[in-house]
Amino acid sequence: MSNTRERGGVDRRSVVKALGAVGAALATPEFSWGTLAAQGDIEPFEIRVSDQELDDLRERLRLARWPPDTPGEPWSYGTDRAYLEELIAHWRDEFDWRVHEAELNSFDHYMTTVDGQRLHFVHQRSRGSSSFPLVMTHGWPGTVWEMLPSVKALSDPASHGGDTAEAFDVIVPSIPGFGFSGEPAEGTDIARTGDLWVGLMDQLGYDRFGAYGSDWGAAVTRYLGGRYPDRVAGIHTPGAPPRQQREPNTEPERDYLRRSELWSVDETGYQRIQGTKPQTLAFGLTDSPIGLAAWITEKLRSWSDCDGNVENRFSKDQILTLVSIYWHTRTIGTSVRYYYANGLGSSRGRSRGGGPVQVPQGYAQFVGIPSRSGPPRSFLADPPDNVTHWSVFDTGGHFPAIEEPELLVGDLRKFFGPLR
């Protein structure tokens, strides 16, 4: 076995990692040495990608290498080449990052350090004196991007069809390793993320708050509701209460299980590689903007209420804003590492849980994807007494905060109203 330690007792892996962190910090939007040195101080943050970085991206897109097209129906083998070529041409020739960078910067962004972890977050305060703090947690392949269409309506209800008494102070952190937050410490899982959120809320001076999250964010939110009942007033997540663990008795119940099994076969392969070999995937997706766009766009299409046409839900500019966030921050590799940390796709087990939810909880089902419409009511267990709210909407999919922001905002106002 070769010796991996250099003279002076410095581990080569540690040197490479440290140099990589510095390089990423210098290449990533608005990371200064002052920001890197800050320990616990909250600093305003501005997203700013260099002209050199944008020029490099355009050159990579110009030099695209395409695989042979596939037989069969479009999208049947994965991302459709014809659509991806169209999207990449738009990225190269028409997409204006500066426009979307300015839109992102219209929100109030900050950086801080909690328990050694560098955290980025949006903190959109309400002007009202009776506002209620709400932490919103995104999932994968989302970033804070997926929550932002709902943020301004929550923080400024008077300008978005609501009443000033319904205002929230909205906090949207970037999960470590996603977007603008720093590289996660080893083992950063759902529980660690929830603990960091509580530390962040401590820094912001919020003793009591509500929580909403989707995808991984739903798991973080449920952890908060189980681990911190003294701090969390209530939690809200997409979906329905758990189903009964029994054999199906009716045709609708059998149909639900068939659809679930088919979904598991067709749509969860990504979890295996992200949960077992995330670094292998990271090399290709960090180096190829086209590969990155293909990986993310296919999920946006499959998981949204778009009827097979991703642009029924997301414009090209919306898709490319999300892809660009991952590209310019070089965080696709650390984001997929979250699956490994939580034991998804391997025999290592799942993340540490926070125990049963002990606070009021609300559910909102968005059943616009026929194959993911959820179990029939007969198949659901009797919800616990602390399920105080349960809505079902005929539209929307995996990303309700950006697919159906008006429906979600209204539902959050309704659920948290009695808890304020």
Image (cartoon, grey):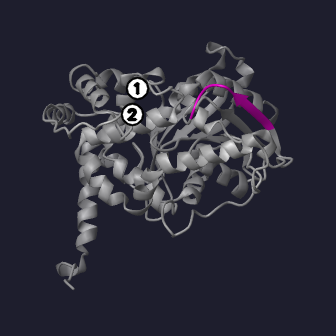
Residue 390 part of the magenta-drawn span: yes
Residue 45 position (above or below residue 279): above
Residues in magenta, as a range: 389-397
Residue 318 got which mark?
A: 1
Q: Give the image quarter of residue 125.
A: top right
Residue 322 got which mark?
A: 2
Q: CA distance from mark 2 to mark 1?
A: 7 Å
- Pinpoint residue 166: horizontal percent, then vertical percent: 72, 24
Does residue 66 appear in this view? Answer: yes
Image quadrant in which the C terminus is located: top right
Q: Secondary structure at mark 2?
A: helix
Circle 1: residue type: Gln
- Pinpoint residue 263: horizontal percent, then vertical percent: 54, 45
Q: Give the image quarter of residue 21.
A: bottom left
Q: Secondary structure at mark 1?
A: helix
* Contact check, label 2 and label 1, Cβ < 8 Å: yes
